[in-house]
Each structure stands twice: as structure tokens, then as C-alpha cells.
Image (spheres, rainbow, N blue to C red):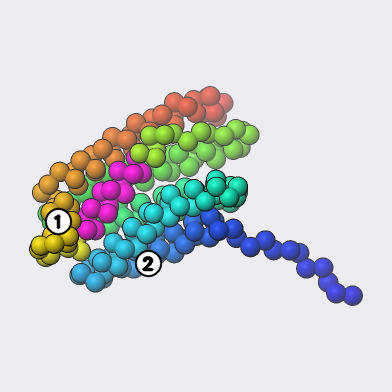
């Protein structure tokens, strides 16, 4: 008599895309470990593709009716790992003399731990902690800062044409890097406080 083999459901497409973001994050980390144009170029491409999948997996999950508990867990986790890895790099690597303060990276990581912890408490209480809309904007400005920094590192010595235009836009002496960074910092603090405010009833019983 043949043994009963349980059916293993394949990972659906949105979740596969989310998992690919984790793989791309690994490639990004490896690429920035090799300073120089080739390494930074690979880091820029992998980070940009990974950032794009953040939108794509959610869109496909809703469009195809494939929103799953695994996807709800993996999607924000992959986002946090990608962004935190990039900010750790930028705290250690000045970009054209512009340095991301270590306390900014610590603040971003602390906020992610805070929100994750609050969501776990909510799940334990049988509740759902609604996503903060400011959190999406926070992530957007974080990604803009990181991509801008990577563009500069990759195209710093370029001149003329599209490369020159992108280089000028990403110049740390310009407006895009500082504006995106400090807007991300402000949204990180405000959205974190919003999560704390929205979970007061959960913390009161602890």
C-alpha cells in the first residue's frame, strides 16, 4: 500500500515575487561590498528592481485574489530587510561627502521593530493593526533617497546625455537627497507615533 503523501501547494506568483525581493536584497548587499562602478551599478539595478517588486506583488495579489497570510507576513518583512540593509550601507558609506547619520538608520530600524512588535501583540489579542497610510509614504521617500544615492555612486564620473542628467539630479549637493532623507525621517517618526497611538488599548492591558 502506497503511503499517503500530503499535497504541497506551490508558492503563488505574488509570494514568489516577494521571495525574489529577499534574494535581490542579498545580491544588493553582496554588490555594495565591492566598491567601484561595477559593484554600485549592480547594486543600483538590483535595488531598483527589488523596490519595483514591492508594488508589483501587492498589485498582483489583489488583482488575482491571491492575498494570503504568508504574503501578509513576507511582504512587509522583505520591505524592511531591503530598506534597512540600504540605510546601514549609507551610514557607513559617504555619498559625495553626504553622510546618512547613524542615528537616522537606528531610528528607522527601531521604528520597524516597534511596528512589528505592535502587530504581534495585536495578533495575539485577535485584532488587526491597520496599516498607516503615512507608512507607505515613508517607504517611498526612503526608497527615493536610497536610489538617488546609488545613482550618484554609479554615475559620479559621467557627463553629458541621460547619464549626466541623472548624475546632476542625484548630486548630493543638490536638493533631492537631503529632501528625501529628512522627509523620510519625519514620516518615520510621525507614522511610528501613529501606530503607538492606535495601539494604546492593546498596550494598556500589558
- Depth check: 162 or 24 in front? 162
> Which residue appears at 45% of the width and 52% of the height?
56
Which residue was labeled with disc 2?
Answer: 27
Which residue was labeled with disc 1?
Answer: 165
> Which residue appears at 17% of the width and 60% of the height?
162
Can you tell which mark lies on residue 151? none
Q: Is residue 129 left or right of residue 146?
A: right
Where is residue 58 shown, x and y percent of the image? 49, 48
- Foreground label between 1 and 2: 1
Q: Is residue 85 left or right of residue 163?
A: right
Residue extent of the magenta highlight: 138-151
> Which residue appears at 12% of the width and 47% of the height?
174
- Residue 168 is one of the magenta-drawn residues: no
Would you call the spot at circle 1 few (<14 residues within 10 Å), some (14-19), or many (20 or more)? Answer: some
**Where's the C terminus, which quadrant?**
top right
Where is residue 22 shown, x and y percent of the image? 45, 60
Residue 77 visible in the current orientation: no
Would you call the spot at circle 2 few (<14 residues within 10 Å), some (14-19), or many (20 or more)? Answer: some
Amino acid at each position: 500500500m502506497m503511503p499517503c503523501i500530503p499535497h504541497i501547494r506551490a508558492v503563488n506568483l505574488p509570494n514568489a515575487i516577494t521571495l525574489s525581493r529577499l534574494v535581490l536584497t542579498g545580491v544588493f548587499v553582496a554588490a555594495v561590498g565591492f566598491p567601484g562602478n561595477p559593484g554600485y551599478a549592480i547594486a543600483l539595478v538590483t535595488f531598483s528592481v527589488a523596490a519595483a517588486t514591492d508594488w508589483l506583488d501587492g498589485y498582483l495579489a489583489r488583482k488575482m485574489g491571491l492575498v494570503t497570510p504568508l504574503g501578509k507576513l513576507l511582504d512587509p518583512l522583505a520591505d524592511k530587510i531591503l530598506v534597512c540593509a540600504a540605510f546601514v550601507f549609507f551610514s557607513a558609506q559617504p555619498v559625495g561627502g553626504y553622510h546618512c547619520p547613524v542615528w537616522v538608520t537606528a531610528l528607522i530600524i527601531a521604528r520597524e521593530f516597534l511596528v512589528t512588535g505592535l502587530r504581534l501583540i495585536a495578533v495575539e489579542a485577535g485584532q488587526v493593526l491597520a496599516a498607516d497610510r503615512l507608512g507607505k509614504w515613508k517607504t517611498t521617500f526612503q526608497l527615493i533617497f536610497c536610489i538617488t544615492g546609488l545613482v550618484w555612486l554609479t554615475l559620479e564620473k559621467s557627463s553629458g546625455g541621460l547619464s549626466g542628467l541623472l548624475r546632476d539630479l542625484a548630486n548630493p549637493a543638490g536638493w533631492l537627497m537631503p529632501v528625501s532623507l529628512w522627509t523620510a525621517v519625519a514620516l518615520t517618526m510621525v507614522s511610528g507615533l501613529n501606530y503607538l497611538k492606535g495601539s494604546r488599548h492593546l498596550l494598556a492591558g500589558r
